[in-house]
Image (cartoon, coloured by chain):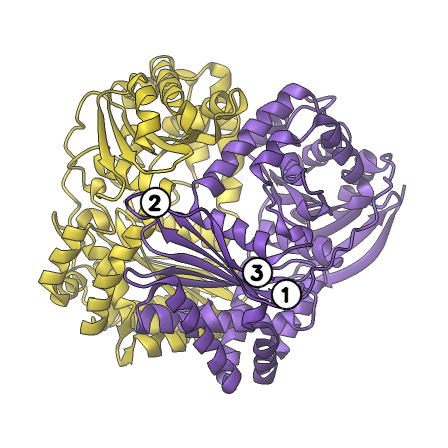
Chain colours: A yellow, B purple
Amino acid sequence: MKAIVEPSPDTPLVWFEVAIRGGASADPIGVEGLHRHAGLLARRGAGRRQRAELDDTLDSLGAALDVSLSRDSLALSGLALTRHMDAVIDLAADILAEPRFDDDEHARLLRETPQVLDEIRDDDSALATRWFDWLCSPGHPYGRTSLGTEASLARIGELGRDAARELWRREVVADNLVIGLAGDVDEATAERLVQRLVERLPKGARVADAPEPRPPQPGRRTILVDKPDRTQAQLRIGHLASRYGHPDTAALAIAEAVFGGMFSSRLMQEIRVKRGWSYGAGCALRRSRLPHWFEIWTAAGIDVAGAAVALELELYADYAEHGPTDDEVDFARSYLVGAMPFHVATARQRMQLAVRDSLFDLPVGYTARLPELLGQLAASDVRAACSRHFHPENAVTVAVTTAEHARPALEAANAGPITVVRHDEY
Amino acid sequence: MSWQLEAEAPIGRGVTAKRYRLGNGLGLIAAIDKRAPIVALQTWFRVGSRHERPGATGMAHLFEHLMFGQTESLPPGEFDRLVERTGGESNAATWVDWTYYKLSLPARDLALGVRLEAERMQHLVLEPTPVEAERDVVTNERRERVEDDVDGWLDEQLMAHAFTVHPYRWPTIGWMEDIRALALPEIRAFYRTWYAPNNATIVCVGDFDDEHLRELIAQHYGHIPAAQLPAPAELPEPVQSKERVVRAPKPIATDRLLVGYKAPGQDHPDWAALEIVSTLLAGCPSARLYRKLVIDQEAASSVDAQLTPFRDPSLLRLAVTTARGHGADEIVAAIDREIAGLVEQPPAPSEVEKAKALAETDFWSALADVDGKAEALGHYETALGDFRRLSAIAERLTAVTAADVARAVRTYLVPAHRTIVIAEPEHPDGDDADDGEDAGA
């Protein structure tokens, strides 16, 4: 078990995070959504308290305990007023050590989750991300939906609450946790609180990583997610890239900033400033433990959706081939180095970064020390990283829009063969 | 030009905010917080969508875009490049009562921030080409946030039907036809009218020297003359006497609805009690409506409540997404039953204390970083006229009793004073009626 403490008396609040290695990428194939289901179910009753009593107790303390899921971990996050932190830590410890996994809550959660799917289908941006995650690199562990599908949720129902219980028994063990505390708490108190969180857990062992992803499918392709009455197209373009912590991470941070990580970046200037095609345009390298996506995002007017895809692919191909100029590298480096104090300004931010670094098995202080690495890079290093990691020839495009209006222009966008799907079929 | 110290009050642990005034009317709220080598430099203008005229809606928000453009000494794009080169970020926000411009800067670059903000307050270049480019961006922003977003559409329709006279009735982003029609002479006149030192407050929180900051600001702003500000237009909303209901089909899976009850402005003595009501109904996992609709009856997949923090009377809003197999009318009936229950039997003191504990956590969370402190100071100073209302309203919250809650429910949460907007799934055959209003007054 790894513990991180960031004391700061700025406000009478304590934040904590218990990160459980595993996450959505560890869901068994066909049982996608199991980690989310187990985590939410654990939060719905622990020890002697059923869901209602647990909620009443937390709310009366003015506190919050929330479960969140990423590709790499399941997290129980807490917020408490200093005077109530012991009580809230005890409730969190109950959730970790003695979740009830009540039958009625298991059944209720299985009825609720498909409605979260409905909400995603109602939200074009979330829908584009869901489809892109699934089809960017088929077979990749990060392509497994953290929420699940109707079929995988039915499978969780067949397996019953014992599947959640078994997951908890296997993964919620001391050696599989990274714990962070921040805020109005001194080191000695924090140590005591961390001990309380784990004292009823078995030592256990770290869960194994998800298997290495298969190489991505070569060639461009487009998935047109057909939804009626759209005035825009929510666009995602990208492919499998590298993991956070790869030796090229610092160079890629500069490459990302130049192409789409700032307002001054190429994408924002070409799409929004010069043409007014979208409110925003940018790109991101998803920061994860395993290789994850490089992703370009835009929401373009439906009349220019095809032109926007064509232009972004053209810009991306040029960038992958030539990389940033020397001036662009200097500018982005200055931006990234100057921005670091904003990412570590509060104790909570420092704790969260350290927890993430630890989950990714990176050296202590890796992210906070990135500015040092940035300072050592030459522009040629960044260009070399671009040519190693950027592959416009394999770009996958997802467009959530109305197919009848957008398809002809998308067909002319040089984005590969188009598959049209209904917006509510995944 | 000299500064006058007008007010001083603590804001959080170990941080004191001071309000100064320059001779030309410019306000400055300075709060030193040296825990990180950064500053939040925000410029708040007392101009929002309420200051627009019908037919020219979206004007205040358009400036949120134009203000990052060319000035007399900065070529296009230079503002953003100068800020980003430092590692800082710039942004802006517009709402009904205010517009503010936000710079997050390394502490060493505070002087740059002051210079840039002073430059764009005086010397913005408003020419046809950049204005047309930003007009296109704003129309796309509107498509993304309203036309193609059911929640944005619900929000807009709620305000449009809840208010018949007050300017809160039009959306901050503006109606699409108005955005397209905003004329350059009127855009220029809006800038000259509202972007003046006596209509602005600079808020600076972070690692800086108080005296040096005042010198910098006096140097860059001291020569700017005060403007003749228009007298505030008072357009009180008539008392609503009948429930209003609006329905429209949308490409969604289940009904979504917004219910807005008329509520007082944020500085009204009843606002605190209604804030507690909002929490008790849908502001936490044990809230009454959440528990009833989402957990017990499984009739909704989400329930949220919000009391909008506006200067003038506004709305307590309940937002509900219905569960599969359930409809909006059933939800409205359940809301009525829950409110009737609160009227018949006031909440126990322990339930009110619960909401107050949650409010205390929210209060401190909002002040956890320099940006949050600056936003809180700027909002209360600009919307309510005094940053110290932040603490005063927090104190009002701590004093709310169960009897206050019961009275607030009886007074405000009555069907005749509410507006309901419902988005319903489209019929598969596409044979849907246009937007329709069931009743009105």
Quadrant assignment, res A392: top left
Image height of B128 relative to B351, above or below: above
At mark 2, the secondary structure is loop
For the point 24% across and 49% down, the residue is A146
Q: Which mark identifies residue A353? A: none
At mark 1, the secondary structure is loop
Image height of B318 relative to A231, above or below: below
Horizontal side, residue B328 vs residue B378: left or right: left
Q: Amino acid at mark 3?
A: Gly
CA gap between label 1 and label 2 equals 33 Å
On the same chain, marks 1 and 2? The answer is yes
Q: Nearer the viewer, mark 1 or mark 2?
A: 2
Q: Which mark identifies residue B431? A: 2
For the point 54% across and 74% down, the residue is B356
Horizontal side, residue A255 vs residue B326: left or right: right
At mark 3, the secondary structure is loop
On the same chain, marks 1 and 3? The answer is yes
Q: Circle 1 sits on which residue?
A: B240
